Image: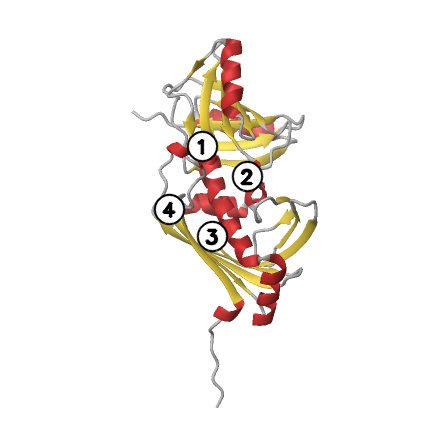
Amino acid sequence: MTTTTNDTTDREIVISRLLNAPIELVWEVWTNPDHIKNWWGPDGFSNTISKMQIQPEGEWNLIMHGPDGTDYRNESIFKEIIVHQKLVYEHKTGPKFTATILFESKGNQTQLHWQMLFPTKEELIQTVKTFNAAEGLKQNVTKLEAYLQAKFARQQELKTTKKARVTTYLNFPGTTEVAFIFYKEVFQGTFLGDGFKRLGDIKGHEGMPPLSEEEKKLILHVELEIMGGHVLTATDAPESMGFKLVQGDNMHIHLEPESRAETQRLFIALSTGGKITMPLEDMFFEAYYGSLTDQYGINWMLTYRELKE
């Protein structure tokens, strides 16, 4: 009599993490190539994604650029998609494995469970030796967590009227504070709200890796009125936290129309002939938001918020 077992512990790498973000947001940054390219991979890696089809039998092709300049080609096929619950893909290029990512809502947090299952115990051992895969997966999840916190943590609401406004949104590789002190002196401007809001101002949660002292000092959000009522806003997006800034792509004209309908009209008009980088939709931070690059290469962000009584 032959006994079979479903025990896979000797040929798998598994990590679980409670993420301080709602499940809709975690799913978005996992399945949208404009997000995942910014956090995917171990420390020091950047990515070029040529195809990412979130559907059964959909292709996911990317090149991971190592810190030493080496390029790593990755080709995968998605096998199972259950929105806000489960992703399964088969990694076809070496090393071969099947990845299963489970998402479980915990209120405003998300429990993430990530398994890499190898065909044999020997292939797992070889992958760990060659690529340090266990540590790489841990760093990958940590970069996801940092991306969620640095890029999407809820900004302090500074707009107190329904009056439309246009601001310029800037990203810096860790120099927001010195840049905005410079701009304040040049324009003799005024910081709005409480001035600099830092990553260290965000309350952490159980299971979250601690921020370094340098990361705590990074700027999450700041607004500076410069002249003619115009406002500059900015955030830090350093490479150490998974971001890859490209000169010219780190500036957006930020529109805040007076109505949802006007936001939609402007978004459709501006995106004609251009590229939508984030579809216009209701977001977790209580805003109707989208971003795009128009046909002339100019970056735009649009936000509409219902003013609370």
The quadrant in which the C terminus is found is top left
Q: Which of marks 4 and 1 is in front?
A: 4
Q: Report the disc number at residue 240.
A: 2
The amino acid pointed to by label 3 is Val
Residue at x 42%, y 52% (from the top left corner)? 17
Is the C-beta separation of discs 4 and 1 under 8 Å?
A: no
Rendered view: 209 above or below 87: above
The amino acid pointed to by label 1 is Tyr
Q: Nearer the viewer, mark 1 or mark 2?
A: 2
Q: Circle 4 sits in a helix, a strand or a loop, which is it?
A: strand
Is the C-beta separation of discs 4 and 2 under 8 Å?
A: no
At label 3, counting other C-alpha atoms closer than 10 Å, the crowd grade (few under 14, some 14-19, many 20 or more) is: few
Q: Name the residue under label 3.
A: 83
Q: Name the residue under label 4.
A: 109
Disc 3 from disc 1: Cα separation: 21 Å
Q: Circle 3 sits in a helix, a strand or a loop, which is it?
A: loop
Q: Report the disc number at residue 107.
A: none
